Amino acid sequence: MSSLDKDLKVKRSLYAKAGIPDYWIVDVSGNEENHRVIVLTEPKDGDYTQEEVLKEGVMRSRVLPMVEIPVNILLGN
């Protein structure tokens, strides 16, 4: 199981069950055009009910709304 697989399956479930409100997965596997940030929010019943995939723009935490991070910085662009 790859690190990304663990993030998308094992950690996703653990974090949702723990009630972690924001879970960001930075996927820089493969070539640069496939890099992405997966944003999971609104945990319920052991999974996240909202999923957003970003390749550009600005990340905003729902827990700390004053925190903004440019996606290109997370992706190393």
Image (cartoon, rainbow, N blue to C red):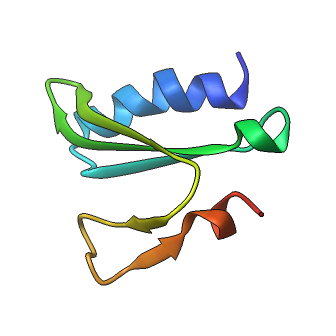
Please state if 1 lies on the left or on the right of 7 as rendered: right
Quadrant including the C terminus: bottom right
| Residue at figure coordinates x 50%, y 74% from the top left | 69
Percent x, y of residue 21: 24, 51
| Residue at figure coordinates x 41%, y 31% from the top left | 12
Percent x, y of residue 2: 73, 23
Please state if 66 lies on the left or on the right of 42 as rendered: right
21 or 31: nearer the viewer: 31
Q: What is the count of numbered marks?
A: 0
The single residue placed furthest to the right in the displayed view is: 31
The single residue placed furthest to the bottom in the displayed view is: 66
In the image, residue 77 sits, relative to residue 8, either above or below, namely below
Percent x, y of residue 22: 32, 52
Percent x, y of residue 64: 28, 75
43 or 70: nearer the viewer: 70
In the image, residue 21 sits, relative to residue 68, either above or below, namely above
The single residue placed furthest to the left in the displayed view is: 44
- Quadrant in the picture for residue 19: top left
- Quadrant in the picture for residue 18: top left
| Residue at figure coordinates x 14%, y 24% from the top left | 45
Quadrant including the N terminus: top right
Please state if 60 lies on the left or on the right of 74 as rendered: left
| Residue at figure coordinates x 58%, y 49% from the top left | 55
